[in-house]
Image (cartoon, rainbow, N blue to C red):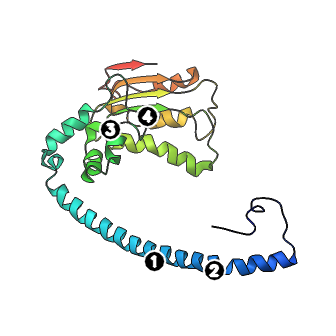
Amino acid sequence: MDSLFASKLGTNYCAGDEESIQIETFLIGPSLRLKRLNDEIAEMQKALDKLTEKRDTLRGFVQAHVALVSSVRCVPLDILKAIFMACLPTHHNCLMSAREPPVLLGRILTVCSSWRIITLSTPGLWASLHVAVPMNRSKGGLKECEQRLEVPRTWLQRSGQHLLSISLQSPRNIPTDTPFSTPAFLRTVLSFASRWQHIRLVIPGQLSETLEQLTAGDVHMLRSLTV
C-alpha cells in the first residue's frame, strides 16, 4: 500500500501540523476498509461459533450412542474388578496418589463414568496403603490437619472387612506435639488393628511404646510386623 510517508514509518519522526492533516485525510479510505474487514470478520466469527456449537452438539450425540456399543461396557463386573485388582502395585503398598491405582482408576471418567463407582465399591482395592507423614507442618490450622488425616481413614474404611497391608513412614526429627504429626497418623492406623495383616512402621522410637498397649486379641490376624 503506497504512502507519502513510507520513509517515515517505523521511525521516531514526529509529523508537523500540516502533515498531520494530510495523514488524517489519507487514512479516511484505509480506515473505512479496515472497519469493513473487521465487520466481515465479526460476522464470519458468529457463523463459525454457530457451526462449532452445532458440531459439538452432534459430536456429543454420536459419542453417547457409540458408548452404548463400547466393548468395555460388555465386560462382566467380576472380570472388570479382577482387572482393577491386577493394576495394583505388587512390590509396595498403594500410594495416596491420583497418578496410581486405585485412585487413578476412579479418575479415568473419559473411559466410563461407572468406573469410579466400581472402584469405590470394591473393598479389595483399598486394603493396601502407604502413609507418608508430611515433612512440613500444616499452615491451614486444625481444619486442614483433620482433612489430611481423613484421607487414610476414609481409604481404609473403603476396604470393608479385608485384611490390611499398611506401611507408615515418618521423617526424622519431625515434631510429635502437633495435631498434624506422626502420632496422629499412627492413631488412625491403630484404629484398624483388628484387620492388620502386614504392617511396617518407620516411626520415632518413643512411639513404639504405643504398640505395647495392643494385645494378641487386638491383632489376631497379624502375619508380619516390622518396626
Q: CA distance from mark 3 to mark 4?
A: 14 Å
> Which residue is disc 3 drawn over?
126
Q: Which is more toward the observer, 110 or 142?
A: 110
Dot 3 and dot 4 residues touching (CB under 8 Å):
no
> Which residue is disc 2 drawn over?
29
Dot 1 and dot 2 residues touching (CB under 8 Å):
no
Give me the residue at 73% from left, 81% from top.
Answer: 25
> Hey, which quadrant is residue 159 in on the image?
top left
> Hey, which quadrant is residue 221 in on the image?
top left
> Which residue is disc 1 drawn over?
43
> Which residue is disc 4 drawn over?
189
On the image, the x and y values in percent for residue 86 come to 24, 31
Q: CA distance from mark 1 to mark 2?
A: 21 Å
> In the rendered structure, which amino acid carries the disc numbered 1?
Glu
In this picture, residue 53 sits left or right of residue 85:
right
Q: CA distance from mark 1 to mark 4?
A: 64 Å
In front: label 1 or label 3: 1
Q: CA distance from mark 2 to mark 4?
A: 79 Å
Q: CA distance from mark 3 to mark 2?
A: 72 Å
Dot 1 and dot 4 residues touching (CB under 8 Å):
no
Give me the residue at 50% from left, 36% from top.
Answer: 185
